[in-house]
Image (cartoon, rainbow, N blue to C red):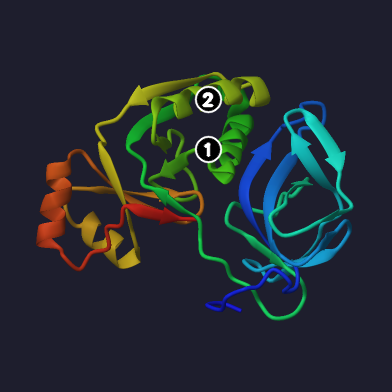
Amino acid sequence: VPGAERTLDSPFAAQVFKVQANMDPRHRDRVAFLRIWSGRFERGMRAVNARTGKPFTIAHAHEVFGDERAVLDEAFPGDVIGVVNAGDLRVGDTLHADGAPVEFPPIPTLAPERFVRIRNRDTSRHKQFHRGLEQLAQEGVMHVLRRDPVADPTPVLAGIGALQFEVAVERLRTEFGCTVGLDPTPYKVARRTDDAGAEVLRGTSNAEVLHSADGTKLALFTSEFLLALVERNHPDVTLDRMLQR
């Protein structure tokens, strides 16, 4: 139950903390990694995705170690299981047994600190380019930010370090056959905001509000000075360094 402590012998509940695609290139699969917090897992059991309220049958569960996989028939609190072809699961999702709803605290992450604009160099790979970006965003590899939440031909990639961009470029090339270019941007700092804050910020010239794939709104600033200026002039605007998944 939201807000209540959960004991180990409570009914089954687990949380998705990582999603990884194409771990097996032969099948282009997608694996969601869950940590079990309570109860006993049994292969083939039916659970509920707390975010959607929809049932989810955990039919293909593996213990994953590097490239090795072993089918799991059961697991217990503290164990990590890999659920194969879990296209409906996202980082932060809670799965629980039928009955009272379960809600675990969201997984916090820091706001990104590096920003580049990404462009597709091969227009014939348009669909693959956007499919690859969507996959990277769902995995939490980085944030894919767009001016328009539906369409933006040159979105902004946002991360903590430059290595994340190198990984994204290589995965787009090897897994989706896309050749991309990265261009610098003037942004230096980002903060999470809400609908009301986005409306205020759009009326200033001190920030640009972009949309993340999960619906999060990020206000991007070209300097710490402009961030401090907005915080001083608009103290009621939400500008949070912590993101939640």
- Viewed as shown, does residue 5 lie left or right of 72? left
Q: Residues within 10 Å of mark 1 (few under 14, many from 20)?
A: some
Does dot 2 land on a helix, a strand or a loop?
helix
Q: Is residue 42 above or below residue 158?
A: below
Label 2 neighbour load within 10 Å: few <14, some 14-19, many 20+: some
Can see residue 238?
yes
Q: Amino acid at mark 2?
A: Val
Q: Please state if 5 lies on the left or on the right of 65 as rendered.
A: left
Instruction: Say whether residue 114 is left or right of residue 105.
Output: left
Give the image location of residue 74, x and y in percent. 86, 55
Q: Quadrant of residue 129?
A: top right
Q: Residue at x 53, y 28 (%)?
A: 168
Give the x, y percent position of residue 94. 64, 63
* Image height of 189 relative to 163, above or below: below
Q: Position of residue 198 (x, y in %)?
A: 29, 59
Front residue of 52/211: it is 52
Residue located 35% across and 33% down the image? 115
Q: Please state the horizontal and vertical placement of residue 64, each as a whole percent of the image.
A: 76, 38
Q: Given contact means CB atoms under 8 Å apart, are the residues at marks 1 and 2 in contact? A: yes
Q: Nearer the viewer, residue 20 or 11?
A: 11
The residue that label 1 is drawn on is: 141
The residue depicted at 23 percent of the width and 64 percent of the height is 237
Return the residue at label 2. 167
Inspect the image, locate mark 1, and give the three-letter code of the amino acid beneath it. Answer: Val
Determine the CA span between mark 1 and mark 2. Answer: 9 Å
Residue 94 lies, with reference to residue 72, above or below; the image says below
Q: For numbered disc 1, what is the local secondary structure?
A: loop
